[in-house]
Amino acid sequence: MKENRPELIRLITVCALILLFILLIGALRAREHPFFRIGAIKNANQEQLPDTVKRRDELQTDRWPEGFRLLRYWWVGGAAVYIAEMDRTAKGLQFDIELANNQILGRETITGATRRLIEKNVQPLAGVNGSFGIREDNRGRGGMIFNLHIQNGELVSIPVSLDRWGYSPPSPWGETSFGVTLDGDFLMDTVRLNGKLRIENGTTDTLSVNAVNQICDSVCPVVLFTPRFGRRTLTRRCYEFTLKEIKLPLTGKYESKFVVTKVNPRGNSVIPFDGIVLAIEPRLARDWENKITKSTTGTLEIALTPKKWQHVQDGVGGNLRLVRDGKVEPELITFGESRGGSSYRHRNGARRHPRSALGFNDKKLFLIAVDGRQPGYSMGMTLYEMGIFFSELGIKHAINFDGGSSSTLWALGRVANSPAHGYERRIFNVAMIRARDENSQ
């Protein structure tokens, strides 16, 4: 036993040194977590910061183009907040939106989406995960947006308002779609489809359309499926009509003639590349199955409201409004003070989690990610805490995006924040800041 004692002491010493090294690295990571990957300097220009900010770091300053900043705020409540800023007057920058995999079905990392764009000579500078959606179900929907998506003027997705987590509720709190018009105006509203299908059968019957590229069911009984959705509609027992000789893509102000070329009473129709599919929920379809038949002709009309949205070039939806006119959204104040009791369907927002958001004021656009679920580094924020903090930073209007483990801010070639699961999760769409097209200047 005496002969083995020196080896035992050496083993204990080595183990103690390893443990000490691990604790030291953990302490450093808790204090400067993403510093291991992205160079940072402290608030160099000595701007006045809110009392709730312990410190602000400027990240990758040597790579900032004119009108762009990448910042990390250390919030006193125990969260790291990453913000990519764009000056609204910057001539070389613009807001943009990108759909994962270039269609509704499926998901993609922000890194993957930016690589695709770079191959097309688009230069992304920053992007944050945007809309809420379904990740998978037994119908093969392995990713599907629940919110608005307008890309390059094309109306890709628009849902109904629902008081359900992930959707925009039918109240001012649900004014959560952000859009940019061709004139560069920033908008934040509840957006409604106002779609109508007029049948030319001697009586001019009119069918109201509820949504574009969404799940067709009893709460959303009439849906248009465009080629942007995917190969098939993936509906269950819906009555479906294939419409051809119709203009594509759909837009915010739209009118086109069509002819019905196929009727499918079982659902899950193939979506033609040069047409769309009209899906009607089974109970409502009883009123229309004899009015719409093969060779039926008619007109499809769409007029988004508010009217300014008919001219939106790029738009993205979230689920709840955080800041209005520089103040916390009134319904969010009630929600925060009741700790979620005022709206149990959105009670997820009353807990501290990783979050993503978009905001703007008269001078800047902000893409935001709040890290969370990482003790010793960042625990996240509630929606109420986000609203208060954003208003303190001078953000005039802000909406909540999908968060949790999806919360990711990609900037200047890499993931800037620290996603909750330790890796970049696949998401539904990306709200981003990019270099402006030379043709659009």
Image (cartoon, helix red, strand yellow):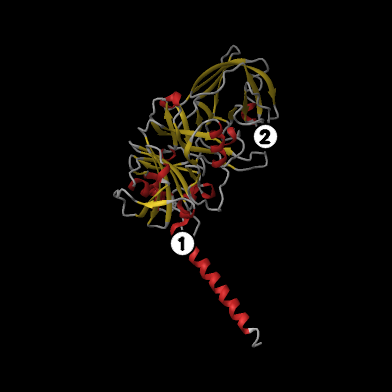
Residue pictured at 53% horizontal, 53% vertical = 420
User: Residue most toward the bottom?
Assistant: 2
Q: Amino acid at mark 2?
A: Arg
Q: Amino acid at mark 1?
A: Leu
Q: Earlier in the sequence, mark 1 or mark 2?
A: 1
Residue pictured at 33% horizontal, 50% vertical = 44
CB within 8 Å, label 1 to label 2: no
The residue labelled by disc 2 is 236
Q: Quadrant of residue 64?
A: top left
Residue 265 position within the rendered picture, expressed as x and y whole percent measured from the top left:
70, 27
Q: Nearer the viewer, mark 1 or mark 2?
A: 1
The residue labelled by disc 1 is 28
Q: Residues within 10 Å of mark 2 (few under 14, many from 20)?
A: some
Q: Nearer the viewer, residue 154 or 113?
A: 113
Looking at the rendered structure, the secondary structure element under dot 1 is: helix
Q: Is residue 104 above or below residue 4?
A: above
Looking at the rendered structure, the secondary structure element under dot 2 is: loop
Q: Give the position of the N terminus as an image quadrant.
A: bottom right
Residue 294 shows which numbered tag?
none
Q: Nearer the viewer, residue 111 or 399?
A: 111
Q: Cα distance, mark 1 to mark 2? A: 53 Å
Residue 421 position within the rendered picture, expressed as x and y whole percent measured from the top left:
56, 53
Residue 93 position within the rendered picture, expressed as x and y whole percent measured from the top left:
41, 33
Q: Quadrant of residue 218?
A: top right
User: Residue most toward the top?
Assistant: 202
Q: Is residue 330 above or below residue 51?
A: above
Q: Nearer the viewer, residue 218 or 263?
A: 263
Q: Residues within 10 Å of mark 1 (few under 14, many from 20)?
A: some
